Image: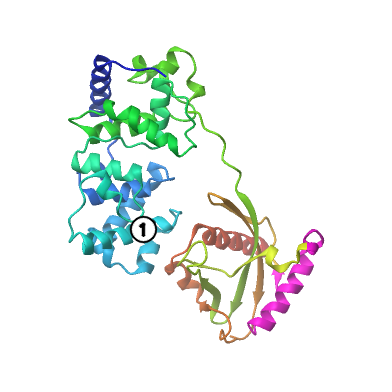
Amino acid sequence: MEEWSATTIQAFRQTLLAWYDRAGRDLPWRRDHDPYHVWVSEVMLQQTQVNTVIPYYQRFMAAFPTVDDLAQAAEPDLLKAWQGLGYYSRARNLQKAARQIVTDYQGKWPQTAAGLSDLSGVGPYTACAIASIAFGQVVPAVDGNAFRVFSRLLLIDADIAQPKTRQLFTDIIQPIVDPDRPGAFNQAIMDLGSSYMTAKNSDPEHSPVRAFDASLRENRVADFPVKTKAPRPKLMPYYGLIIQSPAGVLMVQRTHQEMLTGYWTYPLVRQDDLRDAEATTKATLATDLATLTDRWATEYQLPLDLKPVGGPAVSHTYTHQRWRVKLLVATLKTVPSLTFYPGEWVPVADIAQRPLPKVQEKMMKRWAEAQATATE
C-alpha cells in the first residue's frame, strides 16, 4: 500500500475539491445541507442508481416535506411512496428513525456520526455522510465508491467483502479528509467513483486525480478493489395465483413474518411447500395443480380451476434470493367468502392504489401480455 506525505495529502484535497467545485453533480439533495434531505437521499441511494432515485426523492419530499411529516405518515402512504425502489425495510427504518428524532430527540438531530448511528437503520456510512455533509464533522463516508477510489489510489488490497475492512479504510482515509470541507470531500469521492473511477469502463487516464493514482501508474486498475464473490442468490420457485371474481382480483397483504411486509400481491405459493422431499424430483405442474386445488378447497373453502398462464415465468432477484414465479389463473363466476383466507377482493381499477412491490408489477405486466397475446 502507498502512503502519502502531508504535502501529497494537501495537494490531493486541493485537486479533488477544485474539480468538484467545477464539475460536481447538481443533485436536488445537494442544494442545501438539511440533514433530513441528506439522510433520505443516502438511504434511497443504497443499491439504487442516482438517475433512478431523483424522481423518487422529489415525490417523497413532496409527500413528506419534513421529518415530522414522515414520522406521522400512515404506513400505506409510506410504502406507496417507496414503491419500486426495493429493499423495503429501508422505508420502515426511515420512519422509525424519524419517530426517534421527533420523540426521543425533540426534533433535534444528533450531529455526530456516533449519535446518528443510534437511529434505526442508520449504518456507519450513512451516519458519516450525514455528519460530514450536514454538520461538518471530519469523518470519511466509506461506501462502494470510497472503497474503489482509495483502493486504486493507494493500492489497498484488503478484501472489501470482509466486514473488518471498512474500519481499515476508515482509518486510512480519515487523515486525508479535508478538515475545512469534509462534506464536499465525501461527495467529491462519490462523484469520482461514479464517473472516472467506476467499477466497469472507468476512465482513469482522464481522471482529475490521475496524478495520485498508483493503480494507473502500475497498470493495475482492474486489480482493485479486491472483493471475493458473494454466493449466488438461492432460486425460489413460486406459483402466483391470479384468482378473479365479479368483485375483483384476490390480493393479500404480506405479513411481518414475510419479505415485502405491508405490500400487496397476488397469493404466492412456494412450489417446495406443495411437495414432499422424496417427491420433489417427480413433481410436475399437473401434480402441483392437483395439490393446490385440493388445499385451497379444503383449507380456504375456495374451489379453484387453475390454469397455467402461457409464456415465461416472472423472475425477480433480491440480495439472497431469486424468485421465479409461474402464473396460474382461475376465474370464478360468483364471489366466495374469504372467511378462511386472509385476502381481499380488489377491483382491478383499484389495485394500483395499493402499495405494490416490483415483483407484483412484473406479474401484472406478464398477465396483461398473456391476455393481449390470447386476443390476437
Q: Position of residue 9 (x, y in %)?
A: 27, 19
Residue 73, by quadrant, is: bottom left
What is the image's colouring? Answer: rainbow
Residue drawn 24% across and 36% down?
Answer: 183
Q: Is residue 48 above or below residue 299?
A: above
Residue drawn 80% across and 58% down?
Answer: 281
The kind of residue on which mark 1 rests is Asn
Q: Position of residue 199 (x, y in %)?
A: 47, 30
Q: Residue furthest right?
A: 282
Residue marked by disc 1: 93
32 vs 55, nearest the viewer: 32
Residue 51, by quadrant, is: top left
Left or right relative to 351: residue 143: left
Q: Position of residue 105 (x, y in %)?
A: 20, 59
Magenta stretch bounds: 278-307
Element at badge 1?
A: helix
Q: Look at the image and tell me whether residue 223 can be seen.
A: yes
Residue drawn 76% across and 73% down?
Answer: 290
Residue 288, by quadrant, is: bottom right
Q: Position of residue 273 (x, y in %)?
A: 68, 67
Left or right relative to 191: residue 241: right
**Residues packed near mark 1 inside 10 Å, few (<14), some (14 to 19) or many (20 plus):** some
